[in-house]
Image (cartoon, rainbow, N blue to C red):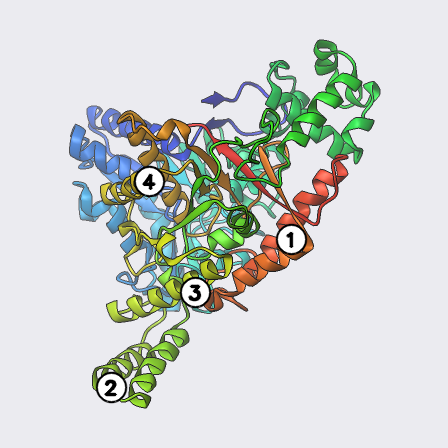
């Protein structure tokens, strides 16, 4: 864990943990200590609570502390930040339901001590409700500890840009970006409420202590503005800078843009300049900042841009430049599975064994070709035994009209060829009737879920066949955590890990590829990666004989890309290979034209992937390395 010293760049006390798991457990323990302290003082503990994906692990840990360590919530009073308006409490997207499912129904809190804004009010009742909500907080003695997340617009609660430091609990219109980010929860942006009731910035600032949590690469940019930027109503979270007791808690991904992590040499940190990754990060930053190839950097460039210590410890710029240039050069390979009968000393992958058994994990049924389709095609072309494991069905990402179209096709197919048509016709009418009357955000029936899952499974098979992967090497895991029919998924479970361990043990791969892109909007990539990591750790503990010969490579692409200083294997793609990759992506027809859950980027997935691949190639070119059409990038996980 890295804890902030007095760094001039940061205006808020900030703690960065290696991952969100450790961070969530630490904050849960802090809350538990406060609850016990208040109980010993025979006083209520008043908590301000947030919703969304960020605090879910925090709430799970509080539940564990209650069940396993006897933490009582009898003296706890809670006030939630916000609620959509209008919103029925039983709706899947309701924050009332969210809090019940993640926390309240699992602990011994008194129902009368729970306060959440009411999304069922008539509009003329809202102002009085908001006034009374503020009074109830004061009657409870004020909030002892307020938990916050942060939106991409910089909002805390639903205080969108323009909210002032003195704003109070009120009805607010949601920003377009906020509604876009919430689209996955509502099965489309058009179903997201346009308004919400939220505690105001002024209300939040009255809490005795505030803890703001943020996870993932997607929050890194706004976290930097909040922590290092000037106070402004265009980023309401910056108003936290005027509070006397604030704690910002991040994982490394969310903190990646902070000066002390991205460019620590600019804030006077003592760095180990014998650590090759630190030197590589500094030199690539310098080259990109000055827009110069690495080999053209001079002693003056280092001295005038905060890197004089590196120069003093490592000698001439000429020597540093060559060392880093060669490190980057060695990442480039046209043989991602290793080149046979070749010296692999300076290659990212081993020459032997050849061919290799390769297992590519794909969280959804198209992540493989979107994020590493060119490398997948290269591995097949070069003779490796390539397996693809689709970890989830991806069924929630299929439009309803696609399900109707396929059900209708089966019914008409049966009728045309005089098959057993009555059950198919009955199924079609049942599915069609359900979808015609389906409410926004309603969970699909089991039959509809199965049809949508079959659509995506068929597309995945088609893409694999196009790439030359035989059917027996295509594996559909359908991990149980995903199969809820809802955007919100279950936490990773023992069955998810067991299925992953079984597949790994069955194939015994020498190479594994997994999605390290953790910025997907609904967190599926994160859970899928956690299942792989835990499976690999357990297999290592069990001393699986094949495991020492296995290397794990992490890819990105659909949502985020590796920074050039992080890349350990760069696979260049020719224009023809990029076209082949695009055709493989196009086999996923239900995701073409407009994905159901596009996230913040409205472009199609193939457009995003190509832009990222071309950008990586341009960066290599600008640093003075060979020029390619596109590059897919990978980072090795050392387990």
Q: Is residue 564 left or right of residue 437?
A: right
For the residues labelled 1 and 3, the Cα–Cα distance comes to 23 Å
Quadrant (top left, top right, bottom left, bottom right) of the N terminus: top left
For the residues labelled 4 and 3, the Cα–Cα distance comes to 24 Å
Question: Would you call the spot at circle 4 few (<14 residues within 10 Å), some (14-19), or many (20 or more)?
Answer: many
> Mark 3 highlights which residue?
459
> Residue 468: x, y in percent?
48, 57
What label does residue 504 carry, if any? 4
Q: Nearer the viewer, residue 394 or 142?
A: 394
Disc with the residue nearer the chain's start (4 vs 2):
2
- Given this view, does label 1 or label 3 mark the residue nearer the observer? 3
Disc with the residue nearer the chain's start (1 vs 3):
3
The image quarter containing residue 448 is bottom left
User: Cβ–Cβ below 8 Å for labels 4 and 1?
Assistant: no
Residue drawn at x 53%, y 58% is 175
User: Cβ–Cβ below 8 Å for labels 2 and 3?
Assistant: no
> Mark 1 highlights which residue?
611
> Residue 465: x, y in percent?
46, 61
For the residues labelled 1 and 2, the Cα–Cα distance comes to 47 Å
> Residue 422: x, y in percent?
21, 86
Quadrant (top left, top right, bottom left, bottom right) of the C terminus: top left
> Residue 608: x, y in percent?
59, 55
Q: Is residue 430 above or below residue 237?
A: below
User: Cβ–Cβ below 8 Å for labels 4 and 3?
Assistant: no
> Mark 2 highlights which residue?
421
Question: Would you call the spot at circle 1 few (<14 residues within 10 Å), some (14-19), or many (20 or more)?
Answer: some
User: What secondary structure is found at the residue carrying circle 1?
Assistant: helix
Residue drawn at x 64%, y 30% is 330
Disc with the residue nearer the chain's start (2 vs 3):
2
Tell me if I can see residue 314 in this picture: yes
For the residues labelled 4 and 1, the Cα–Cα distance comes to 33 Å
- Given this view, does label 4 or label 1 mark the residue nearer the observer? 4
């Amino acid at each position: 864990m890295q804890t902030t010293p007095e760094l001039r760049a940061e205006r808020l006390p900030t703690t960065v943990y290696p991952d969100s798991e450790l961070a969530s457990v630490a904050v849960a323990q802090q809350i538990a200590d406060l609850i016990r302290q208040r109980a010993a003082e025979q006083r209520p503990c008043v908590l301000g609570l947030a919703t969304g994906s960020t605090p879910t692990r925090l709430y799970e840990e509080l539940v564990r502390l209650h069940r396993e360590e006897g933490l009582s919530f009898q003296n706890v009073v809670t006030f939630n930040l916000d609620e959509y308006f209008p919103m029925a409490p039983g709706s899947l997207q309701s924050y009332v339901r969210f809090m019940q499912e993640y926390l309240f129904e699992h602990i011994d809190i008194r129902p009368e001590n729970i306060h959440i804004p009411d999304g069922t009010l008539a509009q003329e009742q809202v102002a009085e409700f908001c006034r009374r909500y503020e009074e109830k907080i004061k009657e409870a003695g004020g909030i002892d500890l307020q938990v916050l997340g942060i939106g991409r617009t910089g909002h805390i609660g639903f205080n969108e840009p323009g909210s002032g430091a003195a704003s109070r609990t009120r009805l607010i219109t949601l920003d377009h970006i906020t509604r876009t980010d919430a689209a996955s929860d509502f099965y489309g942006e058009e179903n997201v409420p346009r308004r919400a009731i939220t505690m105001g910035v002024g209300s939040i600032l009255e809490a005795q202590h505030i803890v703001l949590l943020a996870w993932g690469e997607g929050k890194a940019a706004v976290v930097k503005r909040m922590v290092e930027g000037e106070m402004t109503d265009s980023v309401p979270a910056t108003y936290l800078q005027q509070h006397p007791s604030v704690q910002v808690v991040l994982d490394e991904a969310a903190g990646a843009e902070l000066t002390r992590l991205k460019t620590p040499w600019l804030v006077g940190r003592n760095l180990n300049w014998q650590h090759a990754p630190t030197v590589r990060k500094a030199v690539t930053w310098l080259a990109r900042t000055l827009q110069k190839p690495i080999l053209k950097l001079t002693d003056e460039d280092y001295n005038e841009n905060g890197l004089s210590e590196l120069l003093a410890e490592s000698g001439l710029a000429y020597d540093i430049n060559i060392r880093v240039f060669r490190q980057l050069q060695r990442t480039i390979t046209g043989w991602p599975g290793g080149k046979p009968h070749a010296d692999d000393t300076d290659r990212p992958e081993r020459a032997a064994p050849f061919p290799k058994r390769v297992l590519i994990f794909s969280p959804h049924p198209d992540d493989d070709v979107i994020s590493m389709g060119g490398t997948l095609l290269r591995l097949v072309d070069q003779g490796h035994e390539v397996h693809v494991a689709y970890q989830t069905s991806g069924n929630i990402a299929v439009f309803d009209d696609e399900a109707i179209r396929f059900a209708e096709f089966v019914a008409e197919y049966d009728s045309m060829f005089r098959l057993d048509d009555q059950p198919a016709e009955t199924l079609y009418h049942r599915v069609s009737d359900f979808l015609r009357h389906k409410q926004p955000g309603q969970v699909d029936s089991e039959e509809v879920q199965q049809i949508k899952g079959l659509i995506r499974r068929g597309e995945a098979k088609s893409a694999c066949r196009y790439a030359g992967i035989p059917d027996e090497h295509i594996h559909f895991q359908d991990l149980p955590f995903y199969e809820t029919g809802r955007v919100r998924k279950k936490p990773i479970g023992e069955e998810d890990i067991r299925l992953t361990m079984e597949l790994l043990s069955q194939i015994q791969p020498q190479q594994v590829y997994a999605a390290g892109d953790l910025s997907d909007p609904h967190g599926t990539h994160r859970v899928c990666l956690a299942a792989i990591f835990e499976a690999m750790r357990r297999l290592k503990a069990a001393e699986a004989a094949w495991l020492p010969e296995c290397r794990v490579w992490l890819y990105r692409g659909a949502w985020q890309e590796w920074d050039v200083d992080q890349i350990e294997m760069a696979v260049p793609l020719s224009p023809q290979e990029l076209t082949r990759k695009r055709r493989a992506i196009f086999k996923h027809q239900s995701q073409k034209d407009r994905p159901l859950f596009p996230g913040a980027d409205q472009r199609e997935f193939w457009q995003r992937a190509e832009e990222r691949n071309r950008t990586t190639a341009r960066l290599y070119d600008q640093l003075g390395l060979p020029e390619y059409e596109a590059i897919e990038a990978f980072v090795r996980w050392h387990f």
